[in-house]
Amino acid sequence: MPRSADLPQTIPLFPLAGAVLLPRTRLPLQIFEPRYLQMVEDVLKTPDRLIGMIQPAQPGSDTLSLIGCAGRIVAFSELDDNRLMISLKARSRFRLQKTEQGFLPYLRGQADWRGFEGDLDPRPESLAGFDRSALLQRLSRYAERRGLTTDWDAAEASEEELLVNSLSMLLPFSAEEKQALLESPTLADRRELLDGLLEYALRGGDDEEILQ
């Protein structure tokens, strides 16, 4: 299994509120700002091809969250108007030690990979006693209330980890909620938090109505 010691100590950072990358998932991104176009160009010249996805600590803040997730560029294509579409495949979460601006137009950060060794395992995490039906029923009610469309066939067929992680990434939770999902130590922790967020939303936030 790959080791965290094999990952680079410094990686380019892409701060983006509301976007998180979770273990063994992929994240499509459209790149159009000149500084990030240069970042992608520079990253493609490196052997690791890693970009650190990380959220601002607060909306509009220059301070970054303490934990992000690095992804490897596994696909890219040129679009109109000098834009790029890239796909990041999750490599590992990291703790941000400090940022480095230097002479580049984008930030770089010193990454501490310790504590996230499980992210490097290509085998997905499993959930003991996973109740897919209960999760999908709650998701159905949430999607109906929010006017969202869902590929139910894919949801039924997805592995446990892919389903939980994909929902954590794709559902319209707040940036703070997505960060909490990212920082969940295990898949079981993330599943429990995901259930709680869905239930809270179905209650109408502060509404104390109890779900049946």
Image (cartoon, grey):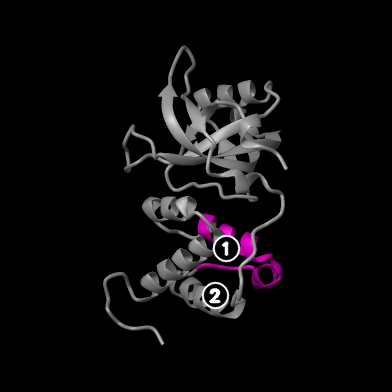
Of helix, strand and loop, which mostly describes the magenta segment? helix
Q: Looking at the rendered structure, which numbered label has been put on residue 135?
A: 2
Tell which of 124 and 176 is nearer to you: 124
Dot 1 amino acid type: Val
Compute the Cα span from label 2 to label 1.
9 Å
Answer whether residue 165 is magenta in the image.
Answer: yes
Q: Are marks 2 and 1 in contact (CB under 8 Å)?
A: yes
Q: Which corner quadrant holds the N terminus?
A: top right
- Residue type at numbered disc 2: Leu
In primary-sequence order, the first of circles 2 and 1 is 2
Q: Residue at x 45, y 59 (%)?
A: 172
Instruction: Judge whether 209 appears above or below 4 on screen.
Output: below
Out of 192 and 61, give the one closest to the viewer.
Answer: 192
Counting from the top left corner in percent of width and height, residue 41 is at: 63, 23
Element marked by disc 2: helix
Start-end of magenta stretch = 148-169
Residue drawn at (34%, 34%), measured in percent from left and top?
63
Callout 1 secondary element: helix
The image shows residue 69 at horizontal and vertical percentages of: 54, 41
